[in-house]
Image (cartoon, grey):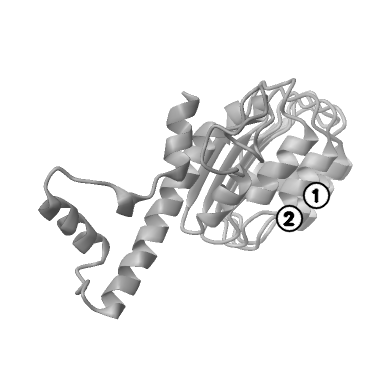
Amino acid sequence: PLSLLLQGLQVCLEKGEATIQKDKDGILFEMGSHADLTTGAGQELLQQNLKRANDALHSTFAILAWPQAMQRGTLLDFGKNAKGSVLGKQKLKLPEILAMDDAREVLELSLAHFEDTCLDSAVKILASGLPSRGLKDLRLSFEGCNRITDQSLTALGSHFCQGLRKLYLDFIGCVKLTDTGLSAIAAGLPSSLEDLELHFAGCSGITSSGLGVLRDRMPKSVQTFCGTFKGTGISRNFPNLEEFLAFTG
């Protein structure tokens, strides 16, 4: 429900109540890493940990709210109802909330088959919200979103976290994509990447030229690769890195 998502996006753990005050004090003591909360250093540590916990909670709710917000056109003003009035306490921008969680290591989001609302503008907003630090594993699906173009891939490719180790991207059936978009993804691959999985089946604008760019820009750190390119200009799949390198030679 929208009301529950709004609460989750704005809740502050330190303002929560417990039936017994001693329980709340104990929780705060744990969150303060057992520091003396009567000292300035202890309070500073507690506030840092509370911010980290609040950011993680808020970003989790932002991810949960994302598909609904994209459909309603409220990614940059979540909580606004159909009449234009704001239901929450403040204007909530989901990409800003997501980006603030720089301790998040895994981000998984599926926007598959949102044909009418997953447009370039929405993907650009998502790209702007990808955490720039800390992220190790990114999994995004746009399967069947046949209205997105190379602009979406260019935006995503320019916002990959430089510490990323695992990347999964699904563009199956995104028929407007071409070598330009694949090249943009390839150009943005971070040097830390170890595991890469790309799905472009049904994207007829992808050719051997785009695969050549992917081969040339593939980070040396990549140890495993899987790619599906059936229905493209190559019309074959690559279950592992060895077959991909042998084909693109």
Disc 1 secondary structure class: helix
Q: Residue at x 77, y 43 (%)?
A: 153
Which residue is denoted by mark 2 in the rendering? Answer: 188
Against 240, is 80 above or below?
above
Residue 241, image x, y percentages: 64, 46
- Spot occupied by residue 189 in the image (x, y as percentages of width and height): 69, 55
> Which residue occupies 58% across, 53% down?
99
> What residue is shown at x 55% (from left), y 49% (from top)?
97
Residue drawn 19% across the image and 74% down it? 36
The residue lying furthest to the bottom in this view is 40
Q: Is residue 124 left or right of residue 165?
A: right
Distance, label 2 to label 1, CA atoms, is 6 Å
> In terms of image quadrants, where is residue 93?
top right
User: Is residue 248 something that shows in the picture?
Assistant: no
- Which image quarter: residue 231? top right
Q: Position of residue 177 (x, y in %)?
A: 83, 33
Q: Are marks 2 and 1 in contact (CB under 8 Å)?
A: yes
121 over 213 or under it: above or below = above
Q: Which mark is residue 139?
A: none
In the image, 211 versus 109, the foreground residue is 109
The kind of residue on which mark 1 rests is Ala
The residue carrying mark 1 is 184
In terms of depth relative to the viewer, which is nearer, 165 or 159?
A: 159
Q: Position of residue 24 (x, y in %)?
A: 18, 53
